Amino acid sequence: MHNIQSGAITTGTWHFLAIRLRVWRQGLVGFLRDLWHHPLPLIAGLVIVIYILAAIFAPQITVQDPGRGNLRARFTPPAWVAGGTMDFPLGADEQGRDLLTRIIYGARISLAVGLLTVGISVLLGTTLGAIAGYFGGRVDHLLSRFADLLLAFPFLIFAIGVMAFLGPGFTNLILALTFKGWVEFFRLVRGAMLAEKNKEYVEAARVCGRRDPAIIVAEILPNVIQPVFVLGTLRMGFFIVTEASLSFLGLGVQPPTPAWGSMVAAGRDYLLTAWWVSTFPGLAILFLVLAINIFGEGLRDILDPRMKIE
């Protein structure tokens, strides 16, 4: 008898998982179909994919060492400018290092900072926002007041202060950005949780005997998670710009590790004689952040039901 019940439970579990997998697959197909009808976000998404692939396969698509220079090639102009060479397609910097190679390797830093910061901020902000919004009371009051306190500080100034205290470096940079980055996700999820927790489907789950953690994770969060994805996409561009700003100020990733912000800072004294040293890393930041923002706006239009009705 026990084996029959265990087999029935196992069969039912697999059936449930198969249904959920089918729903997720249909949702993904529908999303890709909607994305196909939004050409600008689609192009932006392709640009992001190109950046990601270039960062992943940097050793395979570059032939030069990003940290090794040649003073005889110092300030070699781009290949299409008089005196340029295809050995340095985008020119060389003040130490004779290939600028294209360093930009490609620099994409690793910017994307890693953006993805890690957004991931940690989403996880922390969603968890705390769900707890505060669902349970309320003293926990909600303390978390909300702490979030309000952090919002009182301009983000860049706050990050500069944290980095000055912790010291430069990749790990400290992630800590500095996430220390305040979770607040927006906290406020979003908390507000959505307050609006959802007293609706009929949540009351039905309580009547069925489901515990609070199960209600939060399985019932409410799936209905409020889409705006979190949209906000995370948009905040990723912001975090990349903030990382570049801190590296520009010498508080982020330290040379000789290629980071776009420090590359722009290294070339600012040579703008009249070697404009390419700062220009091309700056354009790399511009195109990536612009693509992320356009894709995020398109993601909002696709996932927001009100946009579809309009």
Image (cartoon, rainbow, N blue to C red):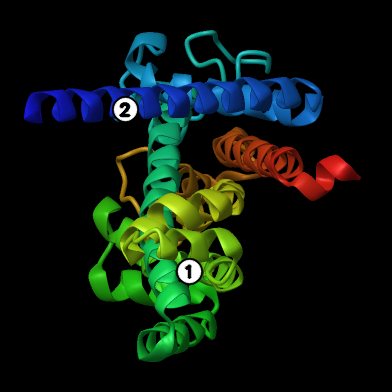
Q: Count neighbours of disc 1 (C-alpha within 10 A) and say few if under 14, some if 14 to 19, many if 20 or more.
A: many
Q: Is residue 195 above or below residue 209?
A: below
The image quadrant of residue 139 is: bottom left
Find numbered disc 1 in the image and state the secondary structure of the residue it sits on.
helix
Place of residue 263 in the rendered image (x, y in percent of width and height, measured from the top left): 47, 43
What amino acid does circle 2 point to? Answer: Gly
Q: Is residue 153 above or below residue 248?
A: below
Place of residue 269 in the rendered image (x, y in percent of width and height, measured from the top left): 55, 51
Residue drawn at 68 percent across, 37 percent down: 295
Give the number of callouts.
2
Q: Is residue 188 above or below residue 118?
A: below
Q: Count neighbours of disc 2 (C-alpha within 10 A) and say few if under 14, some if 14 to 19, many if 20 or more.
A: few
Q: Which residue is mark 2?
A: 12
Q: With 41 as the anchor, is 198 left or right in this view?
A: left
Residue 121: in sight, yes or no? no
Point out which mark residue 186 bears: 1
Q: With 119 as the anchor, is 221 left or right in this view?
A: right
Find numbered disc 2 in the image and state the secondary structure of the residue it sits on.
helix
What amino acid does circle 1 point to? Answer: Phe
- Counting residues from the start of the chain, the first of labels 1 and 2 encountered is 2
Q: Quadrant of the C terminus?
A: top right
The label nearer to you, 1 versus 2, is 2
Q: Nearer the viewer, residue 29 or 123?
A: 29
Q: Quadrant of the N terminus?
A: top left
Residue 191: in sight, yes or no? yes
The image quadrant of residue 112 is: top left
